[in-house]
Amino acid sequence: MSNSTHGSPLLGPLEYAVGMLAPAEFLDLNAGSGTSNESASRLSTNVGAARSLQQRFMNEVQGASGSDERDWLRVWRKKIREPITRFNDAFFDFLIKDREGKDQESITKMKQLITRMSNNMPSSGRSYFPELGWDISMNTVKQELEEDLDIHLEEFKESQKKLLRVYSETLKDLFAVDARLQEKIAKMNQVVDKVQAFMQLEANSELNAMAEPTANYLAAILKNNDISSDFVHFMITYKHWTALYDTIQLSQVAAPNGPPTCCICTIADITHAMIPCGHTFCSGCINKQMSLCYLCRTSVRDRLKLHFP
């Protein structure tokens, strides 16, 4: 089939309908006033208008045919958003103190501040809550606690500092007297070993003459290394340290999770255990006591490095 009819271009639906109702050779004739180009322009305009009306007609028919199947989803989302919106408004009202006395610009700035605080903003020296109208002073709280506990918090704080200071001094004294005891005991053991070896020598006539000077020499050594006073000092100091330790341990109950604190210095984390008793201490304290356990006085055979998760 040819792409033209009587020299005219291929017709669309509307042009075809117009041609069916028009006389023969309508498109090729100068029908009506104006030139043939003007007639073609008006026809093109009418065709465009008809297509727009067609689309509008289809949209209105769809709208009149019933509700969109997605309408229930819009309603559902709206219902879900409503309580969230109410909660957010109530939360802002809660955080912003004395809201009634503030202008809208100030409230907007406070909301922006709350939003920034909720985004894990880095800590700084800035005090945010006073900007929201919150009182962060501790004066009233301290006064209430002092009345409830019947104590003065500042005096209690100073007593804690004094307790820690006395504990530290007692611990140093315990280390010192224990070191003196261990040194004297080591010398005594050396003397005993030497005397036993000396007594195993071959006896002769000159040995009797050496008895009294040797005895005097040993008596002088034993006197210089007498452990009685140091042992009594150690017992008293150890009792003091135990009493202080039991008191200080109360402050460790609410300590944060992590490696336990050394029971000797109460500062460093536990790193080692003594074998065979199993008592644990920090690296500093365990290196200061090489022979006997601080707590049970068991002889130390070895030390075990501990690892905490």
Image: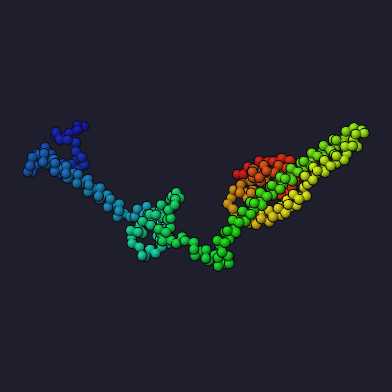
- Tell me if 210 is positioned left or right of 259 in this view: right
Residue 37: quadrant of the picture:
top left
Front-most of residues 41 and 189: 189
**Front one among 232 and 87:** 232
The image quarter in which residue 28 lies: top left
Q: Residue at x 58, y 67 (%)?
A: 150
> Which residue corresponds to the image point at 30% horizontal and 53% vertical from the top-left?
63
What colour scheme governs how the chains and residues are painted in the rendered image of this protein?
Answer: rainbow
- Residue 76: quadrant of the picture: bottom left
Q: Is residue 60 above or below residue 10?
A: below
- x, y percent for residue 231: 75, 50
Q: Which of 51 and 26 lies nearest the eye of the viewer?
A: 51
- Say whether residue 8 is left or right of residue 148: left
Q: Residue at x 74, y 40 (%)?
A: 301
Q: Position of residue 124 (x, y in %)?
A: 44, 50
Q: Residue furthest right?
A: 205
* Residue 53 coordinates in the image, percent (x, y): 22, 49
Quadrant in the picture for the C terminus: top right
Q: Is residue 46 left or right of residue 79?
A: left
